[in-house]
Image: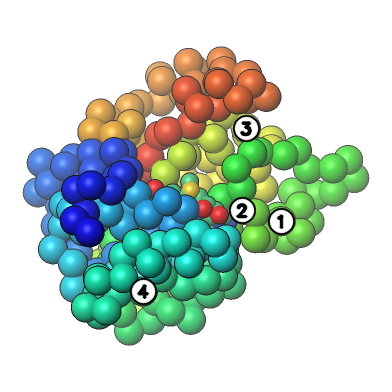
Amino acid sequence: MSLDKLSSNPRLVEVIKLLKSRDIEIPNVFVETGTRGGGGINAIFSTCDVDGMISFEINELDVIKNRERFSEIIEGGTLEIIHGSSADLLSSHINDIGKSVFFWLDAHAAKPKQWKDGYTQEEFRLENKTDYPLQWELDSIINSNIETMIVAIDDIGKFWISKNAFPFNYDDTVSFLKDNNFNIIKCRGEYEIDENNKKSILSHNYLDDDAINAGCHYVLIGHK
Ligand SMILES: C[S@@+](CC[C@H](N)C(=O)[O-])C[C@H]1O[C@@H](n2cnc3c(N)ncnc32)[C@H](O)[C@@H]1O
């Protein structure tokens, strides 16, 4: 099956374009968290030179479907689809995959939820590790032996809108990247956004699904 007949994540394609237009070197090794329909895998293999890619997915049916869908690439040895939670598995797979790696972090629960009364943010975070793996993914990346990297976090607007609904929210993510000396680009596809846009994103009511869909598709890129 040719890749161009399959759906591709348009934001990831635009992110690749944006990075190329800025002469930011794109690594040949890729890691994706959250495979779902395979749109991220398709975007990478359609737009980049790939020496290797690993994609993590917690939903077994998606794993089976995509192993079938990308069977030729998997047999060729450049793609591996791993079943399980990226929060638990990423750290044991990313050492020694390359000195320079592109991460597409896209694993998260479909809907935000508030943490319960009486819980601290830290308690909620620990109890919902599988639903919100981002913090653990970032820890694994920072503690790996990878030297240069691009970390692109999709749907970051969801974390932005639902500030109190996520155990590791947008501001936590930006602080984490800054504290770890990443250069930051905030974009919606190929368009860069700035802090002023935050107001219009925040004005969405995050309990309204349409608003989530309209507002969540921002990508936060850290590179170093
Ligand atoms: C937004 S979709 C991914 C879309 C895909 N990356 C793309 O670019 O088209 C999110 C996926 O993350 C998966 N997921 C959620 N939590 C996860 C976890 N802890 N580990 C791995 N996958 C997870 C969900 O099952 C879902 O398939």
Earlier-in-chain disc, 4 versus 3: 4
Q: Dot 3, how many residues are within 10 Å of its Cα: few (below 14), some (14-19), or many (20+)? A: many
| Residue 100 appearing in the image | no
Going from the N terminus, do you reach mark 2 or mark 4 first?
4
Q: Position of residue 27 (x, y in %)?
A: 19, 64
Q: Which residue is mark 4?
A: 80
Position above or below: 91 against 112: below
How far apart, in angstroms, are the residues tagged by discs 2 and 4?
22 Å
Cα separation between marks 1 and 3: 16 Å
Res 195 visible:
yes
- Quadrant of the image containing the C terminus: bottom left
SS at badge 1: loop
- Report the disc number at residue 132: 2
Front of the two marks 1 and 4? 4
Q: Earlier in the sequence, mark 1 or mark 3?
A: 1
Identify the secondary structure beneath mark 2: loop
Q: Nearer the viewer, residue 215 or 56?
A: 56
Residue 128: which disc?
1
Query: Which image quadrant is residue 188 in?
Result: top left
What residue is shown at x 29% (from left), y 34% (from top)?
189
Identified by mark 2, the residue type is Tyr
Type of amino acid under label 1: Asn
Residue at the (19%, 73%) spot, across then down: 51
Task: Say whether marks 1 and 2 touch (CB < 8 Å).
Answer: yes
Query: Cβ(mark 2) to ligand 1 < 8 Å?
Result: yes
Residue at the disc numbered 3: 162
> Which residue of the protein is positioned furthest toward the right in this rendering?
118
> Residue 208: horizontal and vertical position, in percent?
64, 21
Q: CA distance from mark 1 to mark 2?
A: 6 Å
In the displayed structure, 125 sits above or below 200; it is below
Among the 4 quarters of the image, the one containing residue 55: bottom left
